[in-house]
Image: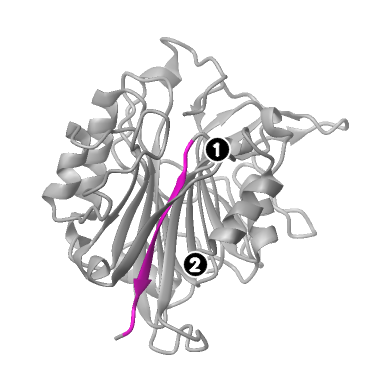
Amino acid sequence: MDFGGVAMDSGGVARRRMFLRPCFRFVLPVLASAAGCENSPEVGPRSPSLIAGSDDGETSSDGETSSDGETSSDGETSSDGETSSDDETSSDGETSSAYVDGDPSDLMVVPPFFPCDPDSNAELSNDALRIVSWNMKAAREAPVEDIAAELSRIGADIIALQEVDVRLRRTGSVDQPAELANALGYAYAFAASIRVDGGHFGLAVLSRLPMVDARRHRLDSRDTSELRIALDVTYCHRGRAIRVVDVHADIYAEVAERQLLEVAELVSSDSGGMLAVVGDFNQLPGEPGLMPLTAIGLVDPFAEDNPATARRGRLDYLLLGNALARSLRQTQVWETRASDHHAIFGDFDLAP
């Protein structure tokens, strides 16, 4: 299930744009300099920070970062530290702006970043880690409260979500990742792919672990009606960096194949490391889109049984770099009626 329900402009600008993997990268200054991202804005001490960036990965030229780290796009930061974008809210609470449904969104929300050093998370009581991926269908099958309750029962340390709404009218103008994070007591990152229905639609990752880095990569979305992204985040678990790339590929097979090839190129240098590429790939086992990911050495721990995760079969994946795969202890499909997809997760033992 993809955005579903909003008609895109067939033949309009949003349908024919091509994005060649520009990304938004927001890191601490010391990491930014090392990564060649000196122009990336520093994330301030508050959580979360709202960042609106231009397509070259830098803060938009008319945006300013306030002293508390909040960033505006072509709006300004108000005296209470809240950040405005290019939307305007009328007295009756409706949001208006000059955009077309399906246009790309620059909205990205991230928590503060932290360096990953040997003392990070020293208070964690054990070396266990659970990573879950779930297409939550924007809480259209069940309310956000039920989604939060389901995630609480799963008890994952890192939660990668697809099909997430932020202030869309169709789901009651709720900021879904913020609501979920508040309910679970986690920090979150949200990256929007498109602006639609008065809000933003995209991917989110929630975690109890400190975040080291977060980037959005726009994927090749030619010949389709919905722009796609990957949300690329790095967390720190007791001094070890763990990279998680959250993906929701296109429903059209040939487009999904191009997008997953891009993802494979993006992560190939980390394929032997502590890496998880997760999400709704919209590919069945054996279809061509998966081949570039397995060709670079990513491990598919569900490959032997290929359990169904949606009505069509298995569409959801947890692909692992070799170092993380060696730490895997078990996998599970979490069956649920709260979405049209089941959740999947892996349990890892990260003892040295």
Residue name at image x 41 percent, y 10 percent: 11
Q: Nearer the viewer, mark 2 or mark 1?
A: 1
Q: Is residue 58 above or below residue 88?
A: below
- Please provide percent x and percent y for residue 216: 41, 48
Please give the residue where the numbered disc 1 appears in the rendered image: 339
- Please provide percent x and percent y for residue 114: 48, 75
Question: How is the model colour-coded?
Answer: one colour
Confirm whether residue 252 shows in the render.
yes
Residue name at image x 56 percent, y 21 percent: 100
Tell me if label 2 and label 1 are in contact, CB under 8 Å.
no
Neighbours of disc 1 within 10 Å: few (<14), some (14-19), many (20+): many
Residue name at image x 32 percent, y 58 percent: 276
| Quadrant showing the C terminus | bottom left
Compare residues 180 and 114 and report the one nearer the observer.
180
Whether the magenta-drawn stretch holds residue 59 is answered as no
Magenta residue span: 341-351
- Please provide percent x and percent y for residue 181: 63, 58
The span from disc 2 to disc 1 (Cα, nearest Å) is 21 Å
Q: Is residue 237 above or below residue 9?
A: below
Whether the magenta-drawn stretch holds residue 344 is answered as yes
In the image as oriented, which residue stretches furthest toward the left?
295
Per the image, label 2 sits on a secondary structure element best described as loop
Please give the residue where the numbered disc 2 appears in the rendered image: 157
- Please provide percent x and percent y for residue 115: 43, 78
Left or right placement of residue 335 versus residue 33 in this view:
right
Predominant secondary structure in magenta? strand
What amino acid is found at the position of numbered circle 2 in the picture?
Asp
Neighbours of disc 2 within 10 Å: few (<14), some (14-19), many (20+): some
Left or right placement of residue 332 versus residue 211 in this view:
left
Q: Quadrant of residue 137?
A: top right
Confirm whether residue 110 shows in the render.
no
